[in-house]
Image (cartoon, rainbow, N blue to C red):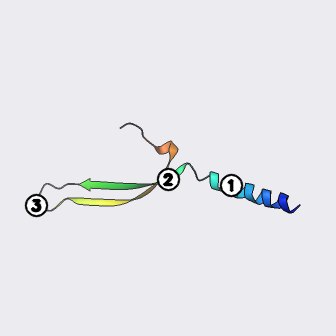
Amino acid sequence: MNRLIRFILVLIAAFALVSFLPAYIERTMLWSWQVNQTPDIINSGWKLGTLTSVRFYE
């Protein structure tokens, strides 16, 4: 009985972990330039992406 309970708990934990596999963290950077004498602005951050939001071509 103890093995069955352990197996069920591991199976539930594995299913919970697998549901997050298609998600990944992406480093983003935005570079905006200005026409006048002020320097360029570079903003960087993080974005949570999924496999369905991947663009293989642009």
Mark 3 residue type = Gln
Residue tagged 3: 37
- Viewer-closest of 33 and 19: 19
Position of residue 21 measured from the top left corner of the image (x, y, whole percent): 57, 51
Query: Residue 14: which disc?
Result: 1
The residue that appears at 30% across and 54% down in the rendered structure is 30
- Give the structural element (helix, strand or loop) at label 3: loop
Q: From mark 3 to mark 1, how far is it between C-alphas?
A: 56 Å
Q: Residue 35: which quarter of the image? A: bottom left
Q: Residue furthest left?
A: 37
Q: Nearer the viewer, residue 44 or 6?
A: 6
Confirm or deny contact between disc 3 and disc 1 (CB under 8 A). Answer: no
The residue mark sitting in front, 3 or 1, is 1
Image marks 3 and 2: residues in contact by CB distance under 8 Å: no
Which tag, 2 or 1, sits closer to the chain's start?
A: 1
Residue 47 x/y as whole percent? 43, 56
Q: Residue furthest top?
A: 57
Which amino acid type corresponds to the residue marked 2 in the rendered image? Tyr
* Residue at the image position 59 percent from the left and 53 percent from the top: 20
